[in-house]
Image (tube, grey):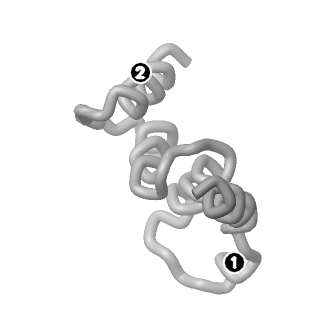
Amino acid sequence: MHSLRVLYDSYRCKCYSPIFDEVEIDNKDIVLQALKTFAETKFDFVDSLLIARKELKFEVIFTFDKKLANRLKSLDNK
């Protein structure tokens, strides 16, 4: 299990690729911010998308996930 965690975490930081500059994506700014958050934290990609939506679009996000809720709440204080 530990070796899988190390392998998985090593790929998290490599998830951004210059190919995103060539692909048409709706809300590309949100996706790129989510990839950055995903690479730098332990949040999964869906949570990273929610964080990015909160950071860039100031959307209200409801969640029962305590870690995600704390991160979103910290964004309110910025």
Residue type highlighted by circle 1: Asp
Give coordinates of residue 47: x percent, y percent: 42, 48
Q: Nearer the viewer, residue 66 or 50?
A: 66
- Along the horizontal axis of the image, is 61 left or right of 34? left
Residue topped by disc 2: 73
Q: Nearer the viewer, residue 42 or 50?
A: 42
In this rendering, the answer to whether 32 lies above or below 25 is above
Residue topped by disc 1: 21
Give coordinates of residue 11: x percent, y percent: 70, 66
Q: Which residue is located at x 74 percent, y 61 percent?
A: 10
Quarter of the picture holding the N terminus: bottom right
Q: Residue furthest top?
A: 77
In this rendering, the answer to whether 28 lies above or below 17 is above
Mark 2 or mark 1: which is in front?
Answer: 2
Quarter of the picture holding the C terminus: top right
Q: Residues within 10 Å of mark 2 (few under 14, many from 20)?
A: few
**In this view of the protein, can residue 71 be seen by the observer?**
yes
Say whether disc 2 or disc 1 marks the residue closer to the N-terminus.
1
Give coordinates of residue 54: x percent, y percent: 42, 38
User: In the rendering, which numbered label is found on residue 56?
Assistant: none
**In this view of the protein, can residue 12 be seen by the observer?**
no
Residue type highlighted by circle 2: Lys
